[in-house]
Amino acid sequence: MTEKLAEMWNELVSKLDAWFVMGFIAQCAFGMRFLIQWIASEKAGKSVVPEVFWYLSIVGSAGLLVYAVKRADPLFILAYSLNSFIYIRNLMLIHRNRRPTPSAT
C-alpha cells in the first residue's frame, strides 16, 4: 500500500506545472460556487442562488476550458465550452431585473 501511495505521489508531483496549478485553481472556483450557494440557502431558510454563484461559475468554467484546451482533452473541452453562455445569460437576467422601472405617473 505504501508503495502505491508513493507511486501516486510521484506521478502527481511529476505533473505539477503552471497549467496544473491553473486547472486546480479553476476547479476550486467552480466547486466553491456550491459552498456559497449552500451557505446562502441555509441563511435564507430556502434554496437561493446568489449572484456570486454565477461569477464563480464563469471563472471556473472558463479556466477549466482553457486547461482542457491546453491538455487537448476533447471530453472536457466539450463539457466546458458552452457553460459560460448560460452563466452570462443568468447574470444578464439578474441585472435586467435589478434596473429600476420608470414610475407610472
Image: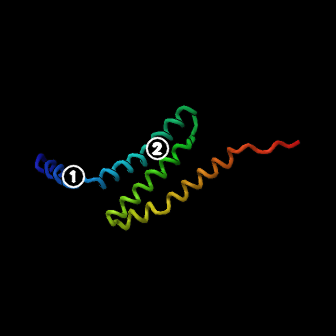
Task: Please provide percent x and percent y for residue 10.
Answer: 16, 51
Name the residue nearer the viewer: 40 or 89.
Answer: 89
Looking at the image, which residue is at 68% across and 47% down? 97
Q: Image height check: is 50 above or below 69?
A: above
Q: Name the residue under label 1.
A: 12
Which residue, given by chain and number where applicable, does mark 2 sit on? 34
Q: In this view, does 38 lie to the left or right of 21?
A: right
- Nearer to us of marks 1 and 2 is 1
The scheme the figure's colours follow is rainbow
Asked if disc 1 and disc 2 are in contact, CB closer than 8 Å, the reply is: no
Q: Is mark 1 on a helix, strand or loop?
A: helix
Spot the residue most to the right: 105
Instruction: Answer few, some or many: residues within 10 Å of disc 1's Cα (few below 14, many 20 plus, some between 14 and 19).
Output: few
In the rendered image, residue 99, in percent from the top left (x then y), is placed at 70, 45
Residue for point 38% across, 46% down: 28
Residue at the image point whose x is 56% and y is 54% from the top? 88
Question: Would residue 2 be found to the left or right of residue 80 on screen?
Answer: left
Choose top left, top right, bottom left or bottom right for residue 101. top right
- Badge 2 marks a residue whose secondary structure is helix
Q: Residues within 10 Å of mark 2 (few under 14, many from 20)?
A: some
Vertical placement of residue 40 versus 77, above or below: above
Q: Is residue 5 left or right of residue 67?
A: left
Front residue of this view, candidates 11 and 16: 16
- Which residue extends farthest top? 43
Marks 1 and 2, how far apart at CA: 26 Å
Position of residue 60 measured from the top left corner of the image (x, y, whole percent): 43, 51
Mark 2 residue type = Phe
Q: Which residue lies furthest to the left in this view?
A: 3
Vertical side of 25 occupied by 44: above or below: above
Give x and y (percent) for residue 87: 54, 54
Please identify the quarter of the rendering in which residue 44 is found. top right
